[in-house]
Image (tube, grey):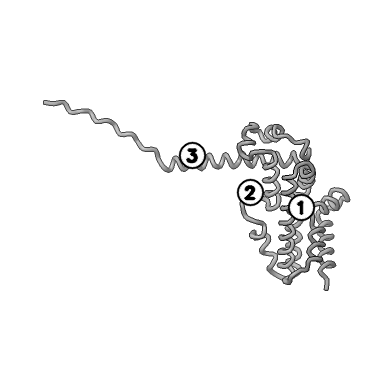
Amino acid sequence: MQPVPKSTPKSTPKSPTRRRYSSQLREQQAGQTRAQVLAAAAELFEESGWAGTTVAAIARQAGVAVETVYSNFGSKKELLRKIVDVAVVGDTEPIPLAERTVFTRLGEGERDARIDAGLAMLADIQARIAKLWRTVGEAAASDSEIDEWRLRWEEGRRVDVRRSVELILEEPVDEVVLDLLWGIFSHEMYAMLVFDRGLDPEQYTARMRDAVLRITAR
């Protein structure tokens, strides 16, 4: 009688759920790391400027290796560009400002309420980016590529100013009005009024409201 061969135990397949969980966990950890680096870089750029901020310093501030900064962002310049993009909209989601609820609601309600909503959006953006914008100016003065980015950002801001003002006023604005508002709503103007002159955010908003009403008066 032939002996009964022993059966080879079958290997247990890995659970797809566990693989998905591990993948999600890694993505979450990677996202947290990127957020730490962005926050650290933004703080250092604001405090120390472009020349005074090194990738090594950013890594130390974020609690990561220098290689981690480079693997996530490629270079100090690309890190600055990402921080500016985040500062404009307030998060890392790839949704343009003009497509966000805070922007589209500028076309809702009475005109006074729309003006208030627009100025609140403006003040929030300026609070996030005005200090950083001084670093952008410093970097642009010594790097032609960053200067090209600066010009594109400004042109994009001009487009957003037109869209927002026309939503609020429910009528087109001419080039003269647009240029004046584009200049008055600039990051440099905010820095001059708030950082240099000492206005608080409420006073800044009041100045901007007065400017809008005067410039757009018929």
Precedes in sequence: disc 2 or disc 1? 2
Q: Distance between the residues labelled 2 and 1?
A: 17 Å
For residue 159, which numbered disc appears in the image? none
Q: Distance between the residues labelled 3 and 2?
A: 23 Å
Q: Which amino acid does label 3 sit on?
A: Ser
Q: Give x and y (percent) for residue 46.
A: 77, 42
What residue is disc 3 on?
22
**Which residue appears farthest toward the right when viewing the image?**
197
What residue is disc 1 on?
126
Quarter assignment of residue 11: top left
Left or right: residue 129 compared with residue 8: right
**Which residue appears farthest toward the left when viewing the image?**
1
Q: Which amino acid does label 2 sit on?
A: Thr
Q: Give x and y (percent) for residue 136.
A: 76, 45
* Above/below status of 62 relative to 129: above
What residue is disc 2 on?
92
Quarter assignment of residue 51: top right
Question: Circle 3: is it few (<14), some (14-19), or many (20+) Cα within 10 Å?
Answer: few
**Which residue appears farthest toward the front when viewing the image?**
144
Q: Distance between the residues labelled 3 and 1?
A: 39 Å
Give SS at disc 1.
helix
Q: Image point 70% across, 41% down: which residue?
A: 77
Tally the marks.
Answer: 3
Give SS at disc 3.
helix
Q: Image point 87% across, 48% down: which residue?
A: 196
